[in-house]
Image (cartoon, rainbow, N blue to C red):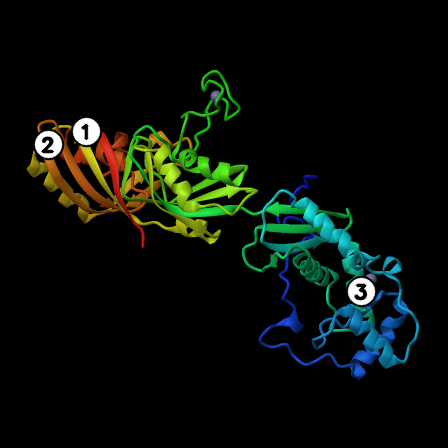
């Protein structure tokens, strides 16, 4: 199978967002508009277009958006009859405009199928790339023959190619989420395909205090593999992402994953309660018909006592936006080492709940986050256990609050902080996220 370079729609100047199959002014389901009728206006346009040496497809497209109900070549023949012209139209290959692009459907469809060979797809979109000069020439013709009804070659081509691919394969052309996006490159005579990702949405619980959420490239070699990371390219041998992704990658023959968590917990923090919402994006999957429940069970079995998936289901790409844009309150349990009487701790918590906390970017994340001061609130706080040299708090805080820094102070970068309020050094012994309060 020739591997075609995939070009994201809209990535080049001459690209148009792939259009669906049922678009266009005269093809609206709700309001198809009037039937195509040759009136004086169209007759005048046709007279002026006659000498241009167009093929029936291109001739018909000059009035492609007038009325509805006829394919472009049929419009051309209707106009010719109305003018009483018997002259033959230009053959596609000698057409001044398209040079036969509309005559080679079998070839285009075959190229599309070849591009997607070995890939499972049921819904598709198609777009096309055209010589910009040709598109400019087409607009010049519309001006020359004074037509307000011109339909662009690209729009018509995308629609017709979509119809033919659907007819040949039984797949569904869509304006919504597609499995593959075909891009016919007319100047190059090729069809490229972009395999769209597969999305799974769910929640994970993390019980292991040594596991990062996502794959963490080795800082020295940046993922290439070196002595320090023993050739793995990773700082940690495993991650929540990898443990969840493994069976899904195997089942879909995908080329990689992206993990979108609704925030992330520290590596040494557990994620309890109902778990943290996330979306797993599987890149370039070859198979889509997967048994999500069975693979979820597989994750729960192989990652036992480390990661659990209480929920998992198929999703669309909009799930990524939903998960990444949420900023829910979060509940924590934090075990603190340090001296403090119950009275003083409670007094400090009452003080903290009254105001906001200013947190300068913690030293430990300064290498990957901009250094600035964020204001956050702790909205609930209570002391749940206290013994000599150790106490436990439960907190509910705004998304993005650095709990460890709030307890320890981070050299004064968090203000106020608990150590400062109690007047003793404190350190976090353990931290658990108890719940993500997403809507
Ligand atoms: Zn033509
Ligand atoms: Zn390395």
How much space separates mark 1 and mark 3, taking CA atoms?
A: 76 Å
Extreme residue in the bottom direction: 40
Marks 2 and 1: in contact by CB < 8 Å? yes
In the rendered structure, which disc, 1 or 2, sits on the residue that comes first in sequence?
2
Residue 137: % across, % down: 81, 61
Crowding at dot 2, Cα within 10 Å, few <14 / some 14-19 / many 20+, comes out as: many
* Front residue (pair 310, 55): 310
How much space separates mark 3 and mark 2, taking CA atoms?
A: 82 Å
Crowding at dot 1, Cα within 10 Å, few <14 / some 14-19 / many 20+, comes out as: many
Q: Is residue 380 left or right of residue 20?
A: left
Residue 238: % across, % down: 40, 29
Tell me the SS state at disc 3. helix
Residue 65: % across, % down: 71, 72
Instruction: Please say if 11 is above or below 142.
Output: above
Count of numbered marks = 3
Q: Is residue 59 left or right of residue 293?
A: right
Extreme residue in the right direction: 87
Specify the quarter for ligand 1: bottom right
Residue 264: % across, % down: 35, 39
Residue at screen point 56% across, 47% down: 196
**Residue designated by label 1:** 426
In the rendered structure, which disc, 1 or 3, sits on the residue that comes first in sequence?
3
Image disc number at residue 340: 2
Image disc number at residue 140: 3
How much space separates mark 1 and mark 2, taking CA atoms?
A: 9 Å
- Quarter of the image with the C terminus in it: bottom left
Instruction: Please say if 156 is above or below 283.
Output: below
Image disc number at residue 37: none
């Amino acid at each position: 199978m020739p591997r075609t370079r995939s070009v994201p729609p809209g990535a080049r100047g001459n690209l148009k967002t792939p259009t669906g199959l049922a678009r266009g002014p005269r093809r609206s389901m709700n309001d198809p508009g009037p039937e195509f009728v040759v009136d004086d206006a169209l007759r005048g346009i046709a007279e002026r277009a006659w000498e241009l040496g167009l093929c029936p497809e291109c001739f018909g497209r000059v009035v492609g958006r007038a009325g509805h109900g006829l394919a472009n070549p049929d419009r051309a023949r209707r106009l010719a009859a109305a003018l009483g012209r018997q002259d033959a139209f230009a053959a596609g290959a000698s057409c001044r405009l398209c040079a036969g692009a509309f005559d080679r459907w079998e070839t285009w469809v075959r190229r599309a199928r070849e591009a997607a060979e070995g890939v499972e797809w049921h819904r598709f979109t198609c777009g096309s790339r055209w010589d910009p000069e040709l598109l400019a020439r087409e607009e010049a013709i519309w001006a020359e023959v004074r037509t307000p009804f011109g339909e662009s070659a690209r729009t018509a081509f995308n629609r017709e190619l979509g119809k033919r691919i659907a007819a040949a394969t039984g797949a569904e052309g869509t304006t919504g989420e597609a499995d593959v996006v075909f891009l016919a490159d007319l100047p190059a005579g090729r069809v490229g395909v972009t395999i769209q990702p597969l999305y799974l949405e769910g929640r994970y619980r993390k019980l292991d205090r040594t596991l990062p959420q996502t794959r963490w490239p080795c800082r020295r070699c940046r993922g290439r593999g070196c002595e320090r990371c023993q050739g793995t390219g990773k700082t940690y041998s495993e991650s929540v992402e990898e443990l969840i992704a493994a069976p899904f990658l195997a089942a879909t023959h995908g080329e990689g994953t992206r993990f979108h968590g609704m925030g992330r917990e520290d590596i040494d923090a557990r994620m309890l309660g109902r778990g943290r919402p996330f979306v797993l994006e599987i890149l370039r999957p070859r198979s889509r018909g997967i048994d999500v429940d069975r693979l979820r069970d597989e994750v729960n079995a192989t990652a036992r006592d480390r990661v659990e998936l209480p929920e998992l289901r198929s999703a669309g790409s909009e799930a990524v936006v939903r998960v990444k844009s949420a900023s829910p309150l979060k509940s924590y349990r934090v075990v603190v080492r340090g001296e403090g009487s119950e009275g003083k701790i409670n007094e400090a918590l009452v003080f903290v709940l009254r105001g906001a906390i200013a947190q300068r970017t913690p030293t430990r994340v300064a290498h990957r986050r901009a250094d600035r001061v964020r204001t956050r609130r702790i909205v609930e706080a209570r002391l749940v256990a206290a013994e000599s040299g150790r106490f436990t708090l439960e907190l509910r805080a705004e998304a993005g609050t650095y709990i460890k820094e709030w307890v320890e102070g981070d050299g004064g970068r968090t203000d106020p902080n608990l150590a400062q309020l109690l007047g003793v050094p404190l350190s976090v012994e353990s931290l658990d996220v108890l719940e993500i309060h997403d809507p």
